[in-house]
């Protein structure tokens, strides 16, 4: 039950209710909109004075072999506050030499250190102590996550930090329950399988959920007895460095967890292609995932798990409770500023309820509170950086130029930082870029369908297959859709349920392998068969 309560913080279900509304800004512009006008989002909070984050930045160096150290080159790079675009800290810029040093430390810790030889119970106790330290420092971590990422502080503090703690409790529980099997043989042989740690794991995490992705990667790898070199996203290095320090306070031996900050083409490429790394896990874009896979194959053919992009369908059937469907579809798309790989970014609505849904979806978007993510009641903060900000605005322009109807939003909010108005398009067709590409921003595309066969065909007509949402009161309809949709997850009358035990991953070009749950352990284990002859066995 505790797990369910924690995951519900990241979930909107049939009982979801609308957030508090705010007064609407006046209508502006005429860019291909219904009724010749675009209504803007509900708040000018982004223009107000910003709250200074209540946290000190203490860790900006790379963590290698248990020590914080400068980059080998002495270089640093800036990390920014997306609310303003201003530098908040300079961080050690790791490159190939830093990766070499980190891998050497991880290799020594695995081959000679106590971690893989430690009893699984002792490993689980360290993971539990770490979870306790995260809980103790959760206020600082939530503030740091919001400052460096731009996500609402209430989301970080009330949803993501509790889930981070729960994930490490979950993996601590697995540490002493990993075992092999005894296998019957056709002849006089005793056969057993051993599940062994894979060795040095290279891990590359994204910027949209830095702490949660840290847990998804580090938790199973450590529970299985591996050592790690983790590269942070260059946009959000601060919280991973902070929690890595907490791991050492919890008693993690030096070299077991190494954290290097740096850029993808230098540090990331060096890690993916390193000959002494035994396995790579990457979360990010599909295009970058292809590069990681190629580097792994061309080096030592190391196994790779990939959690990549998505263009998830959210299907609203004709029997839906429209008010509840609108709220859930809104959450499925706009959660985390739309910067979510499984965002329900193709909202398919049955033609019989399309017009009603559209008007209410537009009204909900206009009520969405955008502003300083440290302020209570703010639902949407800024996009992560200028590059993502400009990318989203380009897609909005593309939608307008493709003759989709811009119902609301469509522009930046304020004059500083990377805030974008919640945007809704109607009359979207499957051939438009906004219906095909992963935008990774607050842009909802609402499409019309006639029947189940049509929506199944169109929902599956994508290179992605990460997730899908289904909203219906008919279980036969739900069962038909859940089996027909080619995705790794189907949420029925809910969305973004991320319990620790629920596997997550994609079909097609959305990735390889699964994160979370028992399936994630398979990514970090080797299976060895041991066969011994039996002399005069009493039984076989």
Image: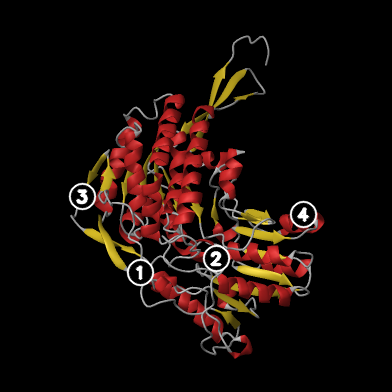
Residue at horizontal 72%, vertical 75%? Answer: 356
User: How far is disc 4 from disc 2 in space, using C-alphas?
Assistant: 27 Å
Q: Which residue is mark 2?
A: 334
Against 162, residue 533 (above or below) is above
The 10 Å Cα crowd at callout 4, few under 14, some 14 to 19, many 20 or more, is few
The 10 Å Cα crowd at callout 1, few under 14, some 14 to 19, many 20 or more, is few
Q: If you read the primary sequence from the N terminus, does the residue marked by circle 3 or circle 4 appear first?
A: 3
Residue 97 placement (x, y as % from top left): 24, 51
Q: Which residue is mark 4?
A: 479
Q: Which residue is mark 1?
A: 49
Q: Which residue is mark 3?
A: 70
Cβ–Cβ under 8 Å for marks 2 and 1: no
Against 459, residue 67 (above or below) is above
Q: Secondary structure at mark 1?
A: loop
How many numbered markers are drawn? 4
Quick check: can you spot residue 277? yes
Cβ–Cβ under 8 Å for marks 1 and 4: no
Left or right of 453 in this view: 432: left
The 10 Å Cα crowd at callout 3, few under 14, some 14 to 19, many 20 or more, is some
């Amino acid at each position: 039950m505790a797990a369910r309560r924690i995951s519900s913080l990241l979930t909107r279900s049939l009982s979801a209710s609308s957030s508090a509304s705010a007064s609407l800004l006046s209508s502006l512009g005429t860019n291909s909109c219904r009724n010749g006008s675009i209504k803007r989002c509900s708040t000018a909070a982004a223009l107000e004075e910003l709250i200074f984050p209540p946290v000190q930045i203490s860790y900006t160096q790379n963590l290698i072999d248990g020590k914080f150290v400068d980059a080998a080159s002495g270089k640093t790079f800036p990390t920014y506050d997306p609310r303003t675009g201003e530098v908040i800290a300079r961080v050690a810029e790791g490159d190939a030499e830093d990766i070499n040093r980190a891998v050497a430390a991880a290799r020594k810790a695995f081959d000679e250190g106590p971690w893989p030889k430690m009893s699984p119970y002792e490993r689980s106790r360290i993971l539990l102590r770490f979870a306790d330290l995260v809980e103790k420092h959760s206020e600082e971590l939530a503030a740091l996550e919001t400052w460096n990422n731009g996500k609402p502080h209430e989301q970080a503090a009330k949803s993501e930090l509790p889930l981070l703690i729960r994930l490490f409790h979950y993996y601590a529980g697995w540490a002493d329950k990993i075992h092999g099997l005894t296998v019957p043989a056709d002849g006089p042989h005793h056969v057993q399988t051993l599940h062994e740690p894979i060795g040095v794991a290279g891990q590359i995490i994204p910027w949209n959920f830095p702490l949660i992705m840290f847990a998804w990667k580090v938790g199973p790898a450590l529970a299985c007895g591996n050592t790690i070199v983790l590269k942070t996203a260059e946009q959000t290095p601060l919280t991973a460095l902070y929690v890595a320090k907490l791991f050492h306070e919890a008693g993690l031996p030096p070299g077991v967890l190494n954290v290097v900050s740096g850029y993808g083409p230098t540090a990331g490429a060096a890690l993916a292609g390193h000959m002494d790394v035994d396995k790579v896990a990457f979360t990010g874009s599909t295009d970058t995932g292809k590069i990681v896979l190629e580097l792994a194959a061309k080096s030592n053919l190391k196994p790779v798990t990939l959690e990549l992009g998505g263009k998830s369908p959210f299907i609203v059937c004709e029997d839906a409770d429209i008010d509840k469907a609108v709220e859930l579809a809104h959450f499925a798309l706009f959660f985390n500023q739309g910067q979510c790989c499984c965002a329900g970014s193709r909202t398919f609505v049955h033609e019989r309820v399309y017009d009603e849904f559209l008007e209410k979806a537009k009204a909900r978007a206009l009520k969405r509170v955008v502003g300083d993510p440290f302020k209570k009641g703010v639902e949407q903060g800024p996009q992560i950086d200028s590059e993502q900000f400009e990318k989203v605005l380009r897609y909005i322009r593309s939608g307008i130029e493709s003759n989709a109807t811009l119902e609301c939003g469509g522009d930046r909010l304020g004059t500083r930082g990377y805030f974008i108005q919640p945007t809704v398009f109607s009359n979207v067709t499957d051939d438009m870029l906004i219906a095909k590409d992963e935008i990774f921003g607050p842009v909802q595309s609402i499409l019309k369908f006639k029947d189940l066969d049509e929506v199944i065909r169109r929902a599956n007509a994508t290179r992605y297959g990460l997730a899908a949402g289904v909203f219906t009161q008919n279980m036969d309809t739900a069962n038909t859709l859940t089996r027909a949709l080619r995705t790794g997850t189907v949420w029925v009358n809910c969305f973004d349920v991320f319990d620790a035990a629920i596997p997550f991953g994609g079909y097609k070009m959305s990735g390889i392998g699964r994160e979370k749950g028992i399936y994630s352990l398979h990514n970090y284990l080797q299976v060895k068969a041991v066969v011994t002859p039996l002399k005069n066995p009493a039984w076989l």
